Image (cartoon, rainbow, N blue to C red):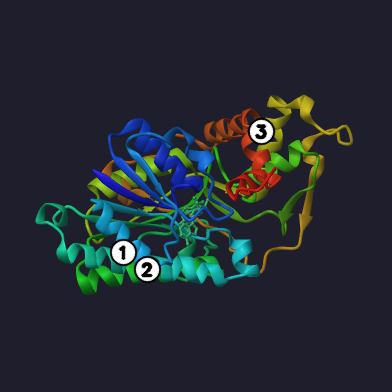
Amino acid sequence: MKIFITGGSGFIGSALVRHCINKTNFNVINIDKLTYAGNEESHKVAIGHPRFIHEKIDICNKIKVQKLFQKYKPDLVMHLAAESHVDRSIDSPNDFMKTNIMGTFNLLEASKDYLKNCDHSIKKDFRFHHISTDEVYGDLDKKDEYFTEKTSYDPSSPYSASKAASDHLVRAWNRTYGLPILITNCSNNYGPYHFPEKLIPHVILSALNGKTIPVYGDGSQVRDWLFVDDHVRALLEVATRGKVGETYNIGGNNEMKNIDVVNNICELLEELAPKMKSKAIKKYKDLIKYVDDRPGHDLRYAIDASKIKQELNWVPSESFETGLRKTVKWFLENKEWYERILNGEYKMKRMGKNI
Ligand code: NAD
């Protein structure tokens, strides 16, 4: 099987690439422009592998995207490339609209044109799998409410609005043109190779560097956390066995308040890295500082993942406790990876600058 993975150098995409190379016999073509969030070191295991090719291409470039379909003739597209950070979308929404909406549109059009002329053997099994977020549903307030696949869309941020728009496009290309699509909407992921600007790595690295740990508002926002490798397994189940045209919600059954996530990380660091603590503090928790809430901040996300469990027999294998321990340990053991990102060295090397 030949797969296009878009965004395979990002956090979730690189976990998918590593899984495909290490645990399947799929041929992977990674289509990734390498924005600030993309990092080839995250899928180092795949570089030079005979079943891996990286095409450094912007999915907003329609002609280049179309040429890729002719060149490789994929059986499956797993579309993860996106601008993904909510805070950045609030400060500067332009790239979110371009990549998340127009980039998805280009891929849909290229897939549709490709299928018109390709062999029946490819046409009958081809799938376009769009990877999306639970943030398209907006937020919940009551404890007993969950997002199901039937929940109406009500996005709050420019990021979630652009992802919602892309989901609608994907469904429309199925209804109007018969493109064989699948959509997954997943809760917050965490794990190794998570870009340092996101909550969990940000807290780990701030604590290790003796910097303030900022917590939005009173920290009572609830998120459902899923370990990234569990997400990857779910994605492959949906892509290979899911029913065409369907949406599957993916979640970890791990609802946590942001402040509890932060406290858990601090406690793990007390246990795993007591000597790395700054001398200016007694406990890692002393670094916590409450800051003004993010505008439009969603209060609670919670996923009902019973459909994927019933239809595809997928359940997460990590609890938040086991997954967070693995994540904190990974960051403690992979200082080089995050330091090169933090000091801009990786990006400069890629641009051919002297470092
Ligand atoms: P990420 O920001 O870590 O990675 C995105 C990747 O896309 C990067 O490698 C980047 O270089 C690439 N990219 C960005 N713009 C591009 C363009 N125009 N052309 C080609 N490549 C481009 O994102 P992530 O956290 O790995 O998320 C991957 C997908 O999963 C996204 O679509 C996101 O909406 C979705 N998702 C993420 C989460 C989460 O918690 N991280 C949860 C649910 C769904």
Q: Quadrant of the C terminus?
A: top right
Q: Amino acid at mark 2?
A: Lys
Say if residue 324 shows up in the picture.
Answer: yes
> Which residue is drawn at the image coordinates 75% and 52% (left, top)?
214
The image shows residue 324 at horizontal and vertical percentages of 57, 36
Q: Is residue 278 left or right of residue 353?
A: right
The image shows residue 43 at horizontal and vertical percentages of 47, 39
Secondary structure of residue under mark 1:
helix
Find residue 66 and name its label: 1
Front residue of this view, candidates 322 and 279: 279
* Badge 1 vs badge 2, beta-carbon distance below 8 Å: yes
According to the picture, the residue beneath numbered tag 3 turns out to be 335
> Crowding near pointer 1: few (<14 within 10 Å), some, many (20+)?
some
> Which residue is drawn at the image coordinates 37% and 31% (left, top)?
22
Secondary structure of residue under mark 3:
helix
Q: Is residue 222 left or right of residue 1?
A: right
Task: State how far apart marks 3 and 2 are (Cα).
Answer: 38 Å
> Crowding near pointer 2: few (<14 within 10 Å), some, many (20+)?
some
The image shows residue 134 at horizontal and vertical percentages of 46, 58
Front residue of this view, candidates 145 and 160: 160
Find residue 296 and name its label: none
Secondary structure of residue under mark 2:
helix
Q: Earlier in the sequence, mark 3 or mark 2?
A: 2
Q: Residue furthest right?
A: 280
Query: Is 151 placed above or below 321 here?
Result: below
Q: Amino acid at mark 3?
A: Lys
According to the picture, the residue beneath numbered tag 2 turns out to be 62
